[in-house]
Structures are given as C-alpha cells and as structure tokens.
Amino acid sequence: METNTATSRSLATEAVHAGRDDLAALGLHAAPLDLSTTYPSHDSRAEAARIDEFAATGARPEGPPVYSRLDNPTVARFEDALARLEGTETAVAFASGMAALTATLLVRASAGLRHVVAVRPLYGCSDHLLSSGLLGTEVTWVDPGGISEAVRPDTGLVVVESPANPTLAEQDLAAVAEACGSVPLLVDNTFATPVLQRPRESGASLVLHSATKYLGGHGDVLGGVVACDEEFARQLRQIRFATGGVLHPLAGYMLLRGLSTLPVRVRAQSATAAELARRLDADPRVTRVHYPRIGGAMVAFEVAGDPHAVISGVRLITPAVSLGSVDSLIQHPGSISHRIVPEGDRRSGGIDDRLLRMSVGLEDVEDLWADLDAALAGERAADTADRDAAAGVPEPSLT
Ligand SMILES: *Cc1c(COP(=O)(O)O)cnc(C)c1O
C-alpha cells in the first residue's frame, strides 16, 4: 500500500488518496470494508509462522490476516493515510484516544520506564490517567521550562498537548523536543490536526490523536491513533493485540472517509473560529479570549457572568462535551471535560471556573454569533429552553 512516489504530494492530495493507492488496481473506488473477525486457512503451518513472526517482531503480518485483534485491512488503510498526513513512518489505531494513550504508556512501563513527565493542561481524562497512576506509572507535572530537570533514568515519556485542551495553551514544540533529550516526546495533536501542525517535524517521536474529534469530524465515531516510527509501532501493535483496544473496522472506514475532508473542514471552521474569537475579544461580557497563534477551530473564553447561563442559553450551538464535529459544540470544562481533574490542579493548569470551550463547526458565522450573543445576554433561561423545544420554536434560518 505504501509507495515512495507519493511522498511529494501535498496534504490536500494525500487527504483524499493516501491509504487508497491500490484501489484502482483492485477495480474499486470506495475502500473495502472488511468486517471479518477471523480468516480461514487450511495451512495452519503458514498461519503459525505468521503468528510467530508477529509475536517476535510486532510487524504487521504479511499475507492473509489471522484474526482481527491482530490486524485488519480497513483499519490499516486509515493508519497508512494518517501516517502520511502526519509525516511519520506509520501509525497504529485504537478504540479511542484513551486506548491509544494507555497503549503508549504500557509500551514504556513494560520496559521498566514507569516515570512520565507531563505539562498541564492536558485533556481531563489524560490528566486523570497519569495522576491516578492507574497503569503503574508515576507522573511529574512541570512547566515546559522544567522538562529536562525532571527527566530521570526511568523516565519513559514526556507528554504535552499543543494547543492544549481546554485553554488552547501552546508549546514551542521544537524547544520541548530538545529538552526531552533521548526520552520520546508524545504530542497530543488532536486540536491542531496535521493540517495546522505536524509535530514530527518539530522533533516529536509520537503524535497522538483522539480520532473521535477532527479526524472523524462528524461526531459519530470513537477512535484513537498514534503516528510514529515502525520500531515503536511494533511495540504498540503487540500491546494492542494483548490488551484488545482495537479500532472497529467500520470506525476505520469512517475515519478514512473523514480524513478526505479534513483539510477543507479545518480551514473553513478555523476561519469562522478566528472571526468569533475577534468578536468575543471586543465584547465587554467576555473577560478573556484564548485563541491559538496557529489558528484552529477551537475558541475558549472566560465570561464576566455565569458560564452555566451561557450553556443553558445556546440554541443553535450544541451544548455538549467533545469537539471537532461539523456542528458547533460548547461546554464548561470545570463541570464536564475537566471535572475529573481536582480543582487545585485545574487552577494550576490555568482552567478558570468561568472558562467556556467552544468547538466551531461549519455553520454560518452570523448564525453562530447571533446564538452566542443571545446566550451571553442571558435572555434565555434553562426553563425557557425546554419550553421552546416543547413549543416547537423554529431553528434559526438556514440562509
Ligand atoms: C477527547 C480527547 C482525548 C481522548 O480521546 P477519546 O477518543 O475520547 O478517548 C485525548 N486528548 C484530547 C486532546 C482530547 O480532546
């Protein structure tokens, strides 16, 4: 499936062709969806050899697949495509972003490297997984400037997010990579996507995505992926096989399709987000706006009034956790996405109680602004929301 001739293609071209290079030769247009859990073979000696090879190396089995916890051709297409977009040798997909982070931590911990250095803020559940030590790891939280000092002989991983969830704080990834020395740097690139930032080019060895967000892009598929070199991927595949956090083939199919519109979605949604950030910044009801230098479709802002009133006041924007969908979503990190992070740790990560996080979709900017404006004005209380819905109050016009 990999061809070296493809490496000079632009991102927009890769988005619609990577992982599908062989389709024309197969006489297919859409990628085949292989839902088999198992694969028949009358040659159990050859199958035994493939299993031995995987156990010894973690390389993707060659020849017919054996069992879908080991390998799936549809998922492999998504992995190949994402690796091309991120500019890495390969990628390994998982059932969710958290399964991807778990497998990465287990690769290092199983080599006796149980110590992790991490920079706040991180996505709430990533923070929790590290802080809780659930996987037998131990975390040291540092400012980016403290990374090299915090590294110990048993440090297996440095973890950063940039732009970070939920404050959109940005890291100088090249400086962070430098500070890591020989310790692998994992960058959670969920918010930026390879359209805006390719952490591999700044020296990160592992690029993680919650594919649930922009890669899928439609709020209907859960997945995770780590883009990395083949050596690390082999260890990830072995952990994935042993622990079972595989991506379902249908999810792989949907994520591959999601990638084809990723560049246009991210660019269009980012343009709208930048305009909303500008208007929020000029609005006296908003005390602070967070919008990354590299751009993106996420906007975070602190309100002078009650953030819960804004959540109960939106009508067009979906009041829900998660992000990266074609429709806009808003949530209150202190209550939802970062609820699991203790209050003091939220504060030290810069997560204000009045912070709201908005994921900007493909709606018209004026419709979004009208909705935000009304929600900020507090014109709509929670009980009127239910009354409006019951009375069938029409949605804003589509023009
Ligand atoms: C959502 C998210 C995750 C976790 O991904 P799931 O697919 O929900 O498991 C990890 N990192 C970031 C930045 C996220 O936004």
Image (cartoon, rainbow, N blue to C red):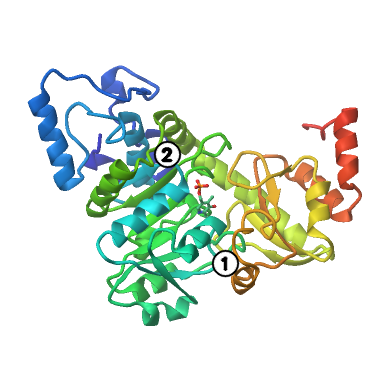
Label 1 to label 2, Cα distance in Å?
27 Å
List x then y, in percent, for residue 328: 68, 43
Q: Is residue 8 visible?
A: no
- In this picture, residue 363 sits left or right of residue 96: right
Residue, disc 1: 169
In this view, the residue in front, 361 or 134, is 134
Return the residue found at the far left.
45
The residue lying at 87 percent from left, 28 percent from top is: 392
**Residue under the point 35% across and 23% down:** 34
The kind of residue on which mark 2 rests is Ala
Image coordinates for residue 199, horizontal then vertical, percent: 40, 59
The disc label shown at residue 15, or none? 2
For the question of whether residue 82 can be seen, the reply is: yes
- Give the SS element for disc 2: helix
Label 2: few (<14), some (14–19) or many (≥20) C-alpha neighbours in 10 Å: many
Extreme residue toward the bottom, this view: 149
Q: Is residue 328 left or right of residue 396?
A: left
Task: Identify residue type, mark 1.
Answer: Ala
Element class at badge 1: loop
Q: State the image quarter where residue 70 is shown.
A: top left
- N-terminal-most mark, 1 or 2: 2
